[in-house]
Amino acid sequence: MTRSYSAVSRVGALALLLPLALLACGRHASPSAAAPVSTSGQGSAPIAATPAPVTPSQNPASTSPSVPAEVTFTDGDVQGQRQGTWSDLEIGDKLGKGDAVKVGAASECQLTFSGMAVVSIRAGTQVSIDSLSLNESASQVKLGLQAGTVLSKVKKLAKKDSFVVRTDTAVGGVRGTEFGVTVTPGGGTLVTVKDGTVAVLPAAYDPDGVRSMSSDNVPELEQIAADIESSAPAVHAGQELTVTPEQAAKAETTFQVIQAAAIQIVQEQQAVQALASSQGAEASSQGAAAPAAPAAMETRTKAIQAATATLSSLIGTPRTLTPMHGQALKALDALPAPSTPASGRSSSAPPAAPPAPPLVTPVRISVSATPADSEIEQDGKIAGTGSYAANVKPGESLTLVIRREGYATKTLAVNAKAPAAYPVQLEPMPIEAEFAVGSSPLVGAVQSSRDTLVAVDRQGELFGVDRQGRTLWKVGSQNSLNENSSPVVGPDNLYFSGSNEFLVVAISSGAVVCRAPLDSATTHLFGQRVAVTSTFGVSPASAYLTIFNPATGATLRQIPVAGGTLMSPTISEGRVLVVSQTGMFLSIDPDSGQVLFQVPTGASQPVASSVLVSGSRAYFADRKGLLVCVDMDARKVLWKIPLKGQGTAGVFQDLEKSENGILAFAGNTIYAFSAADGSELFPPINGASTPPLYREGRLYFGTQGGTLAEADEKTGKTVKSLDLKAVASTRPQADGPRLLVGSATGQVFVIYPDSIQ
């Protein structure tokens, strides 16, 4: 990997940028534009091939040669294509129209376009220079972005100057702006603005393509082009706009109305010219080939106006920058300002005095990292968080390591030849680890105990693995098929019960401490689980609760439960909470077996799930989809809510508590209700493959489409998603800053939710 940097102070000043009213897409008319179009029942000749009109905005006259773009910074794998050949780019290399730049992973390149603009080409980006004219008459730059991201810092432009970034789906033009353009993973275009304004058009809306349909100055064509330009949505500082492939395709269909009208205008013009040429000007004023009648012209004008008026509805309106996108734009701060005079431009400033001989002074090296809380290490020691600066000896080499959890670590090898600023954008890496522990679907929840991850699959086999996926131990059981039973993790042991046996396993070694058979009275066929503390454990049975020694699994005593229970017990403040088959909510002293209080709830046969406790309130759901809230202080039911749709099949998974709500999972649907009064918080979320996890204002759950969804806990709307390429089958489990998720194909995913895009 190589890294180099060059100051841009020697590059000349050049006013620049496409006015918002001159958004040029640079597309020629499509082949269909030259096809004959019949008007008013009359045949018309094909449009003759004509050269593009020469206008100041498109072909500026120049009395001085154009200045090429210059490479002023490279880091890592940076290649340029010149005259059809790819080769490594170095500082000082020149690029012109038709050239291209390709930047590899964890790399960057900066181009300076005279004094007009400085562009940072980010990692994983390919960009072409589709148009380049930098001279004293007018300056134009048009970049074609095929993949990745470019960040541009553009000087305020003169009227004849233009700066455009074009993708397959959109084109953005500016007049003095700091902004970014990204080709999204789905092929769309994201425009983000730090300062100034960017006018955005879908790629099909091509004002210059309309102008170029005739070599003559046709007022109607110019008006169409002007209408397109004035209709472009403007993205201002602190805003962003995304144009999706679907929106771009719809815009292309809509643009056909404008294109057809323009073709008709050109054909009418050609017919008049042909008639005038063959019969004279007088005949043309009387002939049948005259321009369209006023009514037809009005109809055409309305159609064009309707097509341009739909731009905002086609590609939407700008929205406030997301924190992540705003953070990414901070890399613009490290770019030098494009403020020096450009070659070929006159300057009234007197010639600079010859520079004084350079002094041997320390070289200032600075690094700014994104995300801003990234750690920067020098020689194995933390040198800064988010930023780092130091004065070093000329020629001294530094090795800096920038890292943050959830992002790919980047190493910089810096040779301090000259003062330099290094913007570093770490690449998101939300999946820290992905590994298969078996081939059967994982069940329940993948859990952590220090550095050991514990999982169980559908065949009832237990797994202990480290965080890199190396198997530490496996323990088979007689609990197959296991549809809903999850291991319970204690301080030293894990506890697993199912249809046929109860196991206690040492987490550190996988040694089986206890293996006890379960009969028809003690079976946990439906996914019931035990509950444990450091001093005692509770196991449910059809007619009683068993209190056992958590160290050995040995039975200590049994507590009868009137009506029996199929729930998983909950231990809260030393009490055991459970609901009987007849719907009686019970609070039991585990030492004496005494029922401390009971509350009739009207619930019917709660199964497998446990009681959720929040303060003095307890929540549970039954086999028929009834959600119940009990006030344990007042010892009464506060509210009951029946689930609808698939929820009527019953709830067999634990409820989840969010900041303000209670969440239930039933039939691949997530339901949300107010914890205060049971009112619906938001409509049910369909297509879920796991129960949700609540974490810091967000809900995380698997989807049947193979993604991990992140949703707003107040609205239930998905705000981000991560493609797992596998259907999640276990409830996401918090593990410090990470999430643990198991899949239906036996995989475990270790995920950093903060870096999900």
Image (cartoon, helix red, strand yellow):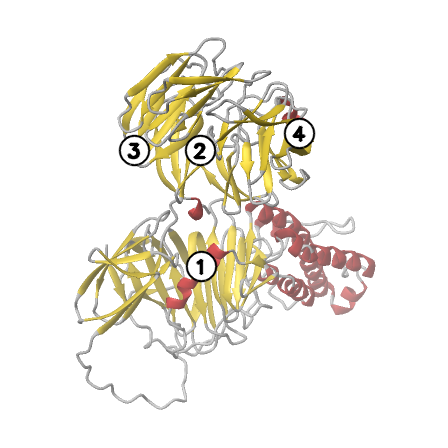
Distance, label 4 to label 1, CA atoms, is 42 Å
Q: Name the residue located 54 percent from the left edge and 66 percent from the top edge.
A: 237
User: Which residue is at the far top?
Assistant: 520
Amino acid found under the numbered disc labelled 1: Gln
Task: Provide the residue designation for mark 2.
Answer: 725
Amino acid found under the numbered disc labelled 4: Leu
* Residue 288 visible in the snapshot: no
Q: Residues within 10 Å of mark 2 (few under 14, many from 20)?
A: few
Disc 4 element? loop
* Residue 429 visible in the snapshot: yes
The earlier-in-sequence mark between 2 and 3 is 3
Task: Provide the residue designation for mark 1.
Answer: 327
Label of residue 466 in the image: 3
Q: In this view, does 467 lie above or below 15?
A: above
Cβ atoms under marks 2 and 3 closer than 8 Å: no
Drawn side of residue 657 relative to residue 427, left or right: right
Distance, label 4 to label 2, CA atoms, is 31 Å
The earlier-in-sequence mark between 4 and 2 is 4
Indicate the quadrant containing the N terminus: top left, top right, bottom left or bottom right.
bottom left
Cβ atoms under marks 4 and 2 closer than 8 Å: no
Residue 258 or residue 694, whichever sits in front: 694
Disc 3 element? loop
Drawn side of residue 215 relative to residue 14, left or right: right
